[in-house]
Image: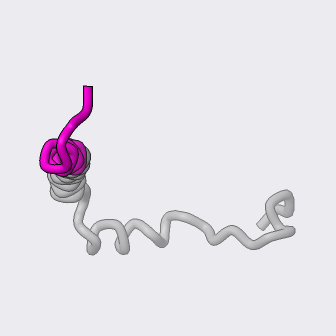
Amino acid sequence: MSLSQGELVAMAYAVVFVFVLAYVAIIAAKLARLQRETTELVELARKRPSTESVIGRAAEYAPIVPGEQGRAR
């Protein structure tokens, strides 16, 4: 069975179209996942205490100096 040149060109375009379609589907799935993760991070950031309260509590914690973990203060 021999195919004409027109049929071969049409088949080549069909194969390229399928690969491009698959690529677009993969990118769309990644974009949807990134949007979900971004939304989740925004929600976590909103639930987190404000910066002022964290800075106010910073005095409660002693700084860690390398080599001085075992020494009494």
Residue at (23% x, 43% y) in the render: 15
Compare residues 71 and 52 and report the one nearer the observer: 52
Measured as percent of width and height from the top left, residue 27 is found at 23, 52
Task: From the top left corner, tell me how far across and down residue 52 is, in percent.
Answer: 27, 74
The quarter of the picture where residue 49 lies is bottom left
Residue 10 spot, x, y in % from top left: 14, 47
Q: Residue at x 13, y 49 (%)?
A: 6
Q: Quadrant of residue 3?
A: top left
The question of residue 70 being in magenta is answered with: no
On screen, residue 69 versus residue 18, left or right, reads right
- Count of marks, rendered view: 0
Which residue is situated farthest in the top direction here? 1
In this view, the residue in front, 31 or 38, is 31
Numbered range of the magenta stretch = 1-18
Of 68 and 15, the residue lying toward us: 15
Q: Quadrant of the C terminus?
A: bottom right
Q: Main secondary structure of the magenta part?
A: helix
Q: How is the image coloured?
A: one colour
Does the rendering let one see residue 47?
Answer: no
> Residue sitting at 35 percent across and 72 percent down?
56
Q: Quadrant of residue 69?
A: bottom right
Is residue 60 toward the left or the right of residue 24 in the image? right
- For the point 19% across and 49% down, the residue is 5
Screen quadrant of the N terminus: top left
**Where does the image place residue 68, in percent across and percent down from the top left?**
83, 68
The front one of 36 and 10 is 10
Residue 45 visible, this orientation: yes
Whether 8 is among the magenta residues is: yes
Relative to 46, residue 21 above or below: above
